Amino acid sequence: MSLWAGFTCYVSKDTYTFVPTNRGDPPRPLQKLVIDRRENVLSLQDTDSLDVPKYDKQFIVHGILGILSLHTTDFMVVVTNRKKVAHILGANIYLATDFRMLPLKTEANPTLLRNPIEKRLLGLVKESLYSGPLYFSYEYDVTSCMQRQTKTEFGPDGAKLPLWKRADERFFWNYHLQEPLMRHAQDLSAFIMPVMFGFLEVKVAQIHQRAFVLGLIARRSRHRAGTRYFSRGIDAEGHVSNYNETEQFVLVDPPSGSTPTSMEEIEGKARMSYVQTRGSVPVFWAEVNNLRYKPDLLIPADPRTVASARRHLDEQVALYGKNYLVNLVNQSGYEKPVKDAYEQVVQEVSNPLVQYNYFDFHHACKGMKFDNVQLLIEQLERDGLRPNDYFMLDTNGAPQVQLQKAVVRTNCMDCLDRTNVVQSTLARLVLNEQLRSVEILGAGDRVEDHPTFLYLFRNVWADHADVISKAYSGTGALKTDFTRTGKRSMEGALQDGLNSLTRYVKNNFFDGARQDAYDLFTGAWDPATQSPEVPVQPWTVRIMPWLLWVSLLFVVLSFLLEGDPARPYKVPTHAPLFPAFWATVALVSLTYIWQHGVLYVGWPTLNRPTALIDYDGPGYRSGLRGRKGTRIDPRRLLAARKTQ
């Protein structure tokens, strides 16, 4: 059953009625979705025509994201605007650009919705909706790579499955919202639209007068979704932070008398894709923010580590075949304990289809020599990685299928900047093989020899890096000047410095709200059983930032006003103790804030990581900087350990 491609929503005091805007192609019997707001009940009703119920107002809906329960009422979340961004294999792909939240209770009036908790949660939902690119299609499964689509399109009886049953649940971003519709007694498949959070860019390219489609899709996992310092490592179910599947694909047709100029003109009779993954180091670890540039590194000695890592790696092997684990963290200094913990757990898991590869990126590429990533490629090829191991479906004549049998899983500390450089290098290597296989490139030819195409390729990958980085760290990626141009520039270095500073501010003071938004939207926090935790700080903690700013203001004013007869409120020149006093106050308050830095971080309020902040068990800790006065009651710590 295919999705309805849009509705008219009729709103009345007692109902929301979603009527399809057309019968589809080919035409099919009409159905409408009715929500009874008095009983909070959904029902699917057949209708003979595009009938109009009684209503107070109406608007166009391009898709239903699902139902989300908040503090006072449930909300139906719908897409009210969209932008066409691509055309893949006969299907249009859209970016959701505007949304609407419809309260389901009839008594949900403006006063009720101004409830402090409800207002806070509504703001978080809107933050989640508007901060991340959400893509959807009425026909194409954007959550699944092309290889997976060949295995999931039809059910055991040979019938074509509805889109939501084909979707990869890891990348079905609104899965939590769609659960009420998926569990409904009636079949609501035509109304259940999966969306993907990530990156999608599709371009028409040309080499040697042969046009083809180059596409890049990054799918972000809904499991353990979060922000840079508030979501690290693995959980008990084997899900890791910042997990993304990146698929680069090529669509090409046989040579013809004309050259296509748009993606709609290319059928994709030969389609090829190459999949890579990235994800946090699969052990229990964290970086505890403390206002320092480098937070405290924590690797608890958690007894669940090996079982969780085994669950993660076994799933990766089941999904992708042999896994080449590329670890790019530093082998000395601050990052070394993470490297050691990773290597130890891989050794203990001992999966024969998992090949661990270490590459000291910063040492090998020192001085911006990112071309030295080729040393890693050579290492992987010695261990069995083949550049012609990719998915291909050729429908010219009798269909021929080639499956990708291995995947490279890359990580650095954040799985962002170093990872981006490695992934784009691998993608370019495989792309050369793919284009040679369809005779767009000759035997000795490379995409590097075609500047116009290389420019397009590099910029698509740099855009991809920026989007993944913004979702996790709050800023664009670092080193993208190299990704875009193949060279390191002074402008790029300055931009990296600005991004690093912006990351510091956002990660310490603003990412708590973003983490809350992810937890609420993906169902990691349940408003029915939990309330936001807003810790009340002692007055001494709250007053120190104000003292700092006031004292700095007086120090500056004492120098600006001193000795100026035109200013009636000048500081007397015989009172040098005035600036000295306020400078001392500034120093004392700054020292206090520095020593109690953890208390000034903008932590999440839904799933506050109290057990990590106050962890006092076995394992590795880089230090306890900025944690003075943060110890919790031992009974609370014992209770936290028992829940682990």
Image (tube, grey):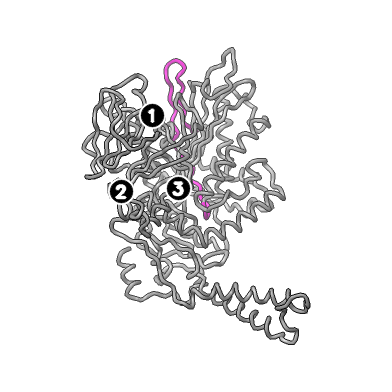
The residue most toward the top is 257
Q: Image height check: is 558 above or below 201? A: below
Q: Which residue is mark 3?
A: 243
Q: Amino acid at mark 1?
A: Ala
Please name which of the two marks, 3 or 2, marks the residue nearer to the observer: 2
Q: Which residue is drawn at the image coordinates 31% and 69% (left, top)? A: 639
Q: CA distance from mark 3 to mark 1?
A: 30 Å
Give the SS element for disc 1. loop
Give the SS element for disc 2. strand
Range of residues picked out in magenta? 389-414
Question: Local crowd at mark 3 within 10 Å, few (<14), some, or many (≥20)?
Answer: many
Queried whether the magenta region covers residue 11, the answer comes back as no
Compare residues 10 and 529 and report the one nearer the observer: 10
Q: Image height check: is 608 above or below 486? A: below
Q: Which residue is mark 2?
A: 74
Q: Image height check: is 190 above or below 112? A: above
Q: Which residue is mark 1?
A: 5
